[in-house]
Image (cartoon, rainbow, N blue to C red):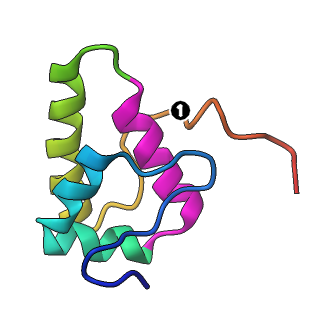
Amino acid sequence: MADQTTLSGGTVHDLPDDLAAALLGAPAARATWEDVTPLARNEWICWVTSPKKVETRTKRIAWGLESLGEGKRRPCCWPGCPHRVKGGS
């Protein structure tokens, strides 16, 4: 498990600074973040970083913190990270 200043990342994507800072300030969301698998964290990272508009990204971070804080383990209505290799080991 990560210490008080570091967070676990995903399988393909690095944890972006804005999402990391938000998670560090939200203990309930952070607890879920550290409890989910690296693949699930990767889905959250890709979901947050995929929009083109900063406003959408900001909304996704806020919604993600709320959802993670409620114990949700994956982004809702997200088909999954398109960057993940499918069928690999």
* Relative vertical location of residue 58 with respect to residue 6 in this rendering, above or below: above
Query: Which residue shows up at 52% across the image and 50% down it?
Result: 42
Q: Secondary structure at mark 1?
A: loop
Main SS, magenta region, reads helix
Query: Which residue shows up at 23% across the image and 36% down it?
Result: 60
Residue 61 image offset from top left, x and y in percent: 21, 42
Residue 56 image offset from top left, x and y in percent: 21, 23
Q: Find out whether residue 83 is within the magenta segment.
A: no
Q: Which residue is mark 1?
A: 79
User: Which range of residues does the magenta coloring cover?
Assistant: 36-50
Residue 15 image offset from top left, x and y in percent: 42, 51
Q: Find out whether residue 45 is within the magenta segment.
A: yes
What quarter of the picture does the C terminus occupy?
bottom right
Residue 70 visible to an observer of this rendering:
no
Q: Nearer the viewer, residue 23 or 72?
A: 23
Horizontal placement of 37 versus 8: left or right? right
* Relative vertical location of residue 65 with respect to residue 31 in this rendering, above or below: above
Q: Residues within 10 Å of mark 1 (few under 14, many from 20)?
A: few
